[in-house]
Image: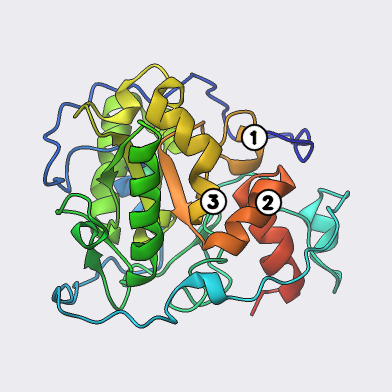
């Protein structure tokens, strides 16, 4: 997923272009522990103290396995708007006062409310280092990945299941079987993950490899970390999991099943995070195919196709 969409951005943030995320996390694989494991997405106490959004979130009970999934639930049926041309003026300051589409914001750290409703716009809502979900946002329904024929202990929104199962079966046929390493994470779990990386690698490094709480795609119930099925080693402990058979297969084929690589190599200035060959976001097959064809990062594609056309202040 490299392409012509990259452009030089003057990042104010410290750019720690250390390859990979190979921090010495020693954690059990199943089930995930909130305070350990995973690369991830979280926040420090200092940062959360500046946030006006209360930390909360009492999770509703997980839906029982007998819950039916309507045939029309999938994102596959979502209409895909015509994508506007790439914008050539990457200066959000001047664009802010205009009424037209807004260019992709430069990478920076803020806590602005995401533009959209995560319950209905989960396939298109932009979550990055600027835009975030409410602390108390929990998907209305979460179901076990075991319902896609994969391990239990991880959860996604129901819309992900059919394509997750198809992806898993295809990876088996390709002799590159993948397994789930992490899926839904609550705001509180993300706090723990970010705090862990900050303690382990320092805050500046943590910001490149982990999202602050509220900013993680895992909180949507559509973000998944994958690992090789034949090894319990977390993918971030490899020098480059993308060079394993499952990692390479995912990079080339995940989009066919509605999953996009959120943080591709070479687009770090656009995604605002280091390359993460294991982290994928489910957006449905149509949007995933469009992102794949665009050659730009999911962040840029979703911004320019959906958020930028909402007008100043979003909606
Ligand atoms: Zn992830």
- Of the residues under marks 1 and 2, which one precedes in the sequence? 1
Residue 78: x %, y % from top left: 58, 75
Crowd band around label 1 with a 10 angstrom C-alpha radius: few (<14), some (14–19), many (20+): many
Q: Nearer the viewer, mark 2 or mark 3?
A: 3
- The CA distance from mark 2 to mark 3 is 20 Å
Q: Secondary structure at mark 3?
A: helix
Who's the residue at 61% across and 50% down the image?
Answer: 298
Q: Residue at 73% of width from left, 66% of height from top?
A: 308
273, above or below 257, in the image: above
- Tag shown at residue 161: none
* Residue 276 visible somewhere in the drawing: no
Label 2 near label 1: C-beta < 8 Å? yes
* Residue 229 pos. (x, y %): 25, 34
Instruction: Estimate how packed mark 2 is, as few (under 14), some (14 to 19) or many (20 or more) residues with alpha carbons within 10 Å.
Output: many
Give the camera-side residue of 51 and 275: 275
The residue pinned by badge 1 equals 267
SS at mark 2 in the image:
helix
Check disc 1 and report its element: helix, strand or loop: loop
State the mark number for residue 300.
Answer: 2
Indicate the quadrant of ligand 1 in the picture: top left
Instruction: Decide if residue 209 is in sight here.
Output: yes
Q: Nearer the viewer, mark 3 or mark 1?
A: 3
Q: Residue at x 71, y 48 (%)?
A: 293
Q: Position of residue 99 (x, y in %)?
A: 85, 74
Q: Quadrant of the N terminus?
A: top right
- Of residue 111 and residue 274, the one placed in the foreground of this image is 274
Note whether 224 is above or below 96 in the view shown: above
Question: Which residue bears the numbered disc 3?
Answer: 256
Q: Earlier in the sequence, mark 3 or mark 1?
A: 3
Vertical relation: 43 (above or below) 53: above
Q: Nearer the viewer, residue 115 or 184?
A: 184
Q: Earlier in the sequence, mark 2 or mark 3?
A: 3
């Amino acid at each position: 997923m490299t392409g012509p969409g990259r452009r030089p951005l003057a990042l104010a943030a410290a750019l720690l272009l250390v390859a990979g995320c190979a921090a010495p996390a020693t954690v059990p694989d199943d089930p995930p522990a909130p305070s350990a494991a995973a690369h991830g997405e979280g926040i420090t106490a200092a940062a959360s103290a500046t946030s006006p959004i209360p930390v909360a979130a009492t999770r509703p009970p997980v839906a029982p396995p007998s819950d039916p999934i309507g045939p029309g639930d999938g994102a596959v049926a979502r209409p895909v708007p015509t994508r506007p041309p790439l914008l050539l003026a990457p200066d959000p300051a001047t664009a802010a006062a205009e009424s037209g589409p807004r260019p992709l914001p430069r990478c920076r750290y803020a806590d602005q409310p995401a533009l959209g409703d995560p319950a209905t716009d989960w396939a298109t809502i932009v979550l990055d280092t600027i835009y975030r979900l409410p602390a108390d946002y929990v998907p209305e329904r979460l179901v076990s990945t075991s319902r896609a024929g994969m391990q239990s202990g991880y959860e996604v929104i129901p819309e992900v299941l059919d394509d997750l199962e198809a992806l898993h079966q295809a990876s088996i046929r390709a002799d590159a079987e993948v397994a789930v390493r992490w899926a839904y994470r609550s705001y509180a779990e993300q706090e723990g993950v970010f705090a862990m990386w900050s303690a382990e690698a320092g805050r500046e490094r943590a910001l490149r490899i982990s999202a602050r709480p509220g900013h993680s795609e895992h909180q949507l119930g559509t973000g998944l970390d994958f690992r090789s099925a034949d090894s319990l080693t977390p993918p971030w402990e490899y020098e480059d999991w993308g060079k394993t058979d499952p990692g390479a297969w995912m990079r080339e084929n995940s989009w066919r099943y509605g999953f996009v690589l959120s943080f591709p190599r070479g687009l770090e200035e656009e995604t605002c995070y280091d390359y993460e060959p294991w982290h994928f976001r489910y957006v449905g097959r149509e949007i995933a195919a469009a992102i794949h064809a665009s050659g730009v990062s999911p962040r840029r594609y979703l911004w320019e196709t959906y958020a930028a056309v909402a007008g100043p202040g979003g909606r």
